[in-house]
Image: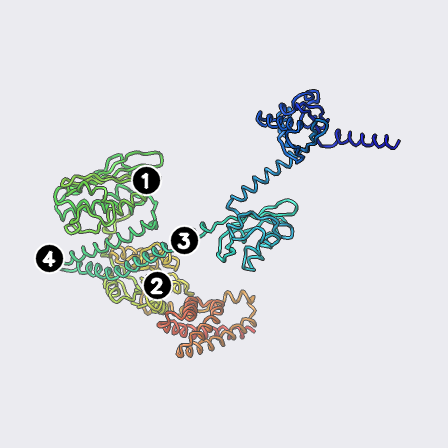
Amino acid sequence: MKIKNKEIENSTISNLLLNEADILVISYNRKGEVTYISPTTEKLIGYKSKKLLGKQWWSLTFFSKEKSKLFRDKIKETISGKREFNPTPYRRKLKCENGNVKWIEWRDSLSDNEIVSVGTDITYWKKKEASKIQSDKILENINSLVMVSNNKDEIIYSSPSVKKMLGYEVEEIMGDKWWDVTYDNKQEAIKTKEAINNYVNFSIKNFVDISKRKIKARNGEYKWIEWHISKGVNDTYISVGTDITDRILTDIELKKAKESAEESLKVKNEFLANMSHEIRTPLNAIIGFTDLLLETKLTTEQKLHLETMQNSGEILLSLINDVLDLSKLESGKLEIEVIPFNLHKQLNEVVRLMKIKAREKNISLNLEIDSNTPKEVVGDPTRLGQILLNLIGNAIKFTNKGSVTVSVKQLKESTKSTTVFFEIQDTGIGIVSNKINTVFGAFTQAKSDTSRIYGGTGLGLTIVKKLVSLLSGQITVESKFGKGSVFKFTLPLQKSSSKTKVEEHEEDLAMDKPLNLNILLVDDNKTNQLLGKTRLKRWGCNVDLANNGIEGVKKTQQKLYDVILMDIQMPIMDGYEATKIIKNDISEQVSKIPVIAMTAYTSKNDIKRAINAGMDDYIFKPFKPAEVYKLLKKYGKITEENNDKNPENIEKQIKPKSKKYIDLKFIREETMNESSILALLIESFINDIDEFLEILDKGFRSKNWKLLHEATHKIKPSIRMFGISKLDQVIHDLVNRFREKQQLNNVDERINLCNEILKDVKTELLTELKLLKDEQ
């Protein structure tokens, strides 16, 4: 009974294994014919048992005939005893009925001239294995470093590239925190840790501080690594680092090269600006005095000599302008105007100017404007004039007989724009054929002896070419040596919606009408003072002189002027600072005096700085008399309402206000006009003034710059609080000078000004204090 029960139990287990368990069972005889196939096997491979029983197993389920034959021979030889039975598990791909592939791991057993094969489906694991092999190969070959960390920030995986990138073996860093491996700077490690924890725990993704970091490799070298962090599975996160050292080093080199180039350009521009300033200043005197002398009675020989001097000065000025324009064009800093102008008027003006030179050489200069050429356009008249003056000037220079003809016509138009064609044709020496392509190059001449014979720097055509391109036009040249040249260019221009206002020519401006203005001329150059005073007196002006900004400021306290002509670069106090003080004067009569900058600096930044300082207009040295007259006539009208310009009466008008330095508006608002608090503050400030003046005197005599810096810095807020605008800029300047210990050789004028003003301020404060106490 027990034996039978045991048999039943064994039979039950066998049925479970064969029918329910996920294992394959199949048996075949010495011929390879299937003698048994389990139900599980049927399900897995899709073949029914009746289709396989008695059939050769390998013929249906193997992929290739070769492998099928090898398997058949193995079975036959094993069953016949020719081959030793091998119980070692083996893996085979199995072809299912539907064509799918299954990986099976088999174990064979030999029984009664049959082989029984028991298999396990390992397809899933085989795919995982293949995927892992592929991933490992990818990770082995990628340049990036991949690390996986757990929720304790410990490295649980690292790609083999850690060896190549940082010099560590994978085993060395397992269990470490990756920022401890990659950062030798504790602060950077902490930043990284916080950023990662915020991301992993709170999904706050902010890796700005850690995305690109310089880290230390095992050999001590530093590398730049760019990190990307992402969440993994099971509370892990993945860190992917890419070596960007070469890119960063290249960027650093490019940045250095850019900074070097910018510094070189800055030095070059500063040099050109200073050179321009240094040349323009004496040139102003040369051209100015020449103009004055030409207005006097002269002999024919004297007039000829002066005209030669004047022409030489104009040539030198033209050269300076050419060099500056070329520099601006090359650096891309030359700005273009877009304003309405009369094209016909502009053309006639240019030709009228150049006819003087043409007459000197006995050649004719003709202007032909086609009837379809628009009159009113929008563009840059100054740059168009510069192009035409250069091209016409060149044509006249290289033409000894014959003519120069300027032709203009409209090429095409639309509702809003027009394209205008310009042609300058001459009968001059022409250009040799092998030099035509080089005429627009800087410092080049068509022939080596051209400069010696005709003069010039070779900059004109270079500037023309660049200006035409800047204006979105095109220029070409045709020439036959010995016959002449033709320069052609086109420019796109906008159509003007309204007629352009025609302005009078400066040359036509009558300068014989007396201006009768009181003018303050502030300039440190004695020659310019003499020139300015002489010219202004011829126009019936009363002229006072000041050698620097501080002298200029003082004179505005003593007399009311119609116009102030202000130089920019001066010792002790420059024109910018002086203008700020004048324009901030508490007296409205003083603050409204027009200030015109007279400067040899011509850059847009210098102009902007002058306007920001409060200057009303500007004029460049060397200037033409007509330009100065026009500005004086324009701004002199501002004070024409003052009928009585007697200096004594003017002093009476301004003196009471000039001594009014303080403005208590701010402090009254802050104290809600509480007289008792105001009185306390004023008393305190009076004591501060006494203390400050004493320190100012002792500190300056002992050259104790630190003490002076502390004192000026301390009193600066009070100067502003009590509205002493006249001293605001002066104190600010002294604070900086004493702190930096620079330009200390000429601070005595500023200190004297502080003494003078603060003594008057003290008097005013005592008056205010008495009034406040009377109120109480």
**Along the viewing direction, whichever of 486 and 356 lies nearer the viewer:** 486
First in sequence, mark 4 or 1: give its number.
4
Provide the residue designation for mark 3: 253
First in sequence, mark 3 or 2: give its number.
3
x, y (%) of residue 360?
14, 49
First in sequence, mark 3 or 1: give its number.
3
First in sequence, mark 2 or 4: give its number.
4
Label ID, residue 493: 1
Provide the residue designation for mark 2: 575
What type is the residue that disc 2 sits on? Answer: Gly
Secondary structure of residue under mark 4: helix
Q: Is residue 49 above or below residue 632?
A: above
x, y (%) of residue 682?
51, 73
What type is the residue that disc 4 sits on? Answer: Thr
Foreground mark, 4 or 1, reads: 1
Instruction: Choose top left, top right, bottom left or bottom right for residue 194.
Output: bottom right
What type is the residue that disc 3 sits on? Answer: Glu
First in sequence, mark 1 or 2: give its number.
1
Provide the residue designation for mark 4: 300
